Image (cartoon, rainbow, N blue to C red):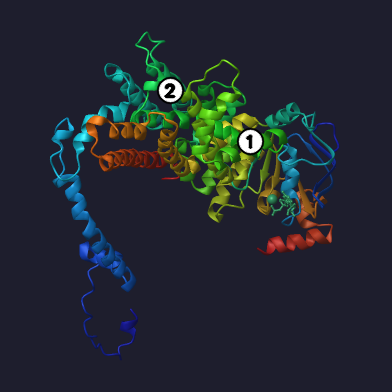
Amino acid sequence: MSNSSDAVIRISNMNKWYGQFHVLKDINLNVRKGEKIVICGPSGSGKSTMIRCINRLEEFQQGALQVNGIEMIDDIKNIEAIRKDVGMVFQHFNLFPHLTILENLTLGQVWVQKKPKAEAEALAMKYLERVKIANQANKYPGQLSGGQQQRVAIARSLCMAPQIMLFDEPTSALDPEMVKEVLDVMVELAEEGMTMLCVTHEMGFAKKVADRVIFMDAGEIVEENTPDEFFGNPQTDRLQLFLSQVLEH
Amino acid sequence: MTANSVPSKIFTPKAARPAPVKTTGAVAWMRQNLFNGWFNTILTLAIVVGVGSVLPAMLDWVFLSASFSGAAQADCTGTGACWVFINAWSQQLFYGTYPAEEIWRINICVVLMAGVLSAPVWLPHHLRNRVDIALLLLFPLVAVVIMDGRLLGLQYVSTDHWGGFTFNVMLAAVSMILGMPLGFLWALGRRSTSMPMIRSICVVLIEFFRGVPILALFFMGSVMLPLFFPEGTTVDKLLRVWIVLVLFMAGYMAEVYRGGFQAIPKGQYEAADSLGLSYWQTTLLVILPQVIKVSMPNILATAVMLFKNTTFLLIIGVPEVLNTAQSALNNSAWLGGYASEAYLFVGFVFWCCCFGMSMVSNHIERKLDTTRR
Ligand SMILES: Nc1ncnc2c1ncn2[C@@H]1O[C@H](COP(=O)(O)OP(=O)(O)OP(=O)(O)O)[C@@H](O)[C@H]1O
Ligand SMILES: [Mg+2]
């Protein structure tokens, strides 16, 4: 466990209920700067809910969460400050369909960061080049393939200069041949030292970049370990069962 | 390929099939669309007979035996329609009793209106949002100033003389322009979960203005509303019906937007939130454009309804086009019963406008469609 003082995300005893349903049970997790964490687990185990709590797309009822030293409380100032530091990439891309790719990337910069438009566009083009899609800048999201859209979504998040990136199954809505182009971008990002929390079932990606892999089941963190130990020497029956099911595919 | 590997089979030609029924051209089209099955055949024949028995007489009345030229009742010599009547009264039908030498002001307003309403089509993409909104909100003010004339040092024309078809058009346009944003605010209020008070107020407003017939609203506007104003203030009757129209429009638009809001996936809000956009930024920059886009057909339908409903103002004595037509019909120089001509003409003019609106909105829809490759 990394309880060191340089944690950028501290989750302690976090609990969340949907009505009677206990989705998150006593979650404890510290993430160090630059650490890459992969979260996996069966469907409905609360993976999305947990990472969505980190940028307040979901609220939790008990426990505490700190991002970059900022306490997650109801105060809109804190929420805004945390969202500034945290970028998120979704399963279904969630690009804005009425804006061009370039406008998707500049919207946040211009309205949230109050940057001049030219500066925002320059940065947007820089990131579009990095995700190898600069030639599509003036198209609309509906005109791009799924893999291209997801790369745009990653670039859109990066434009906001986040310190932490959250990924919620970024490749599971993609056709198999497009998964690699998105994973390549994510690997590159990991190599540059971005702090990443990634919900994914791409085990190859986990082995390659993760510092820690976390297994969630029924709202609990059941097991966490280095990728080698996690895949090579699973401790709990639940994880063994899960891995055998995932690896069958 | 398999034929080569089975040489034992002997080729025996089949008898030629009959030539296929022609699948293109007029005959084929009629066969496919008008005579496919006994039911459609009967329907088609019935319609042909029905139209055939009415159309010749109608064409005869409208065109062949109609009188077109002239200026007075005496010129109506034909046995058909007397279009001379429309001719003679055309200025009143279009401009009401606005002074003839000042009619250019109305024309300017109409041209301005056409320009402003079509702005989304001709404005360059990067200017569209800001300039368009500014133009739209400025137009009602500018139109009123031009029509009234006092501020510009022109001849003052009181609202009693604003009338005719152009008045219907502008009243509808101006009510649309103000009713659309107001309706959006009401729809937002109705969606609000954190402010129950505002939510209830919006629900009541929307349901009231959608639930009460527009005629009743007009009567309330012209008769009841003055009771609520402080003693001694007189609020122009036109202003009162205008307010009614705006609120009526807002009620309907709020409902249209509600459907639009439901079509926006949750992910759009989440993406906007995760970028750090505020509530109003998300609403105006991300959600509103998409709501308008999906609601476009319904917005147009509501606009057409509002436009046609302006003729109800006849009942409370506002000199809109039908009212003007009725005074023309009652004019002592034209007591011959030209009601058919008058109403057919008014109907035709309305139809032309509504059809034009459909065309424009189709164009806008195609332009807004960002999924095309
Ligand atoms: N808004 C909601 N109301 C009630 N229950 C919900 C809501 N959202 C999620 N849940 C429930 O919470 C549980 C956890 O959901 P979550 O989306 O976090 O699972 P997940 O681990 O991400 O699953 P998946 O792999 O399918 O994405 C599920 O059982 C789900 O049914
Ligand atoms: Mg999920």
Amino acid found under the numbered disc labelled 1: Cys
Q: At numbered mark 2, what does the secondary structure look like: helix, strand or loop?
A: helix
Compared across the picture, whether B77 is left or right of B252 comes to left
| Label 2 close to label 1 by CB (< 8 Å) | no
Residue drawn at (40%, 21%) of the image: B160
> Which residue, given by chain and number where applicable, does mark 2 sit on?
B139
Q: In this rendered view, identify the residue nearer to me: B285 or A207.
A: B285
Name the chain under label 1: B
At a point 37% along the width and 8% down the height, the residue shown is B153
Q: Quadrant of the N terminus of chain A?
A: top right
Q: Where residue B262 sits in the image (x, y, percent)?
A: 58, 45
Figure quadrant of residue A153:
top right
Q: Nearer the viewer, mark 2 or mark 1?
A: 1
Location of the C terminus of chain A (image quadrant): bottom right
- Residue drawn at (64%, 40%) of the image: B270
Query: Could you say which disc has been placed on residue B202 in the image?
Result: 1
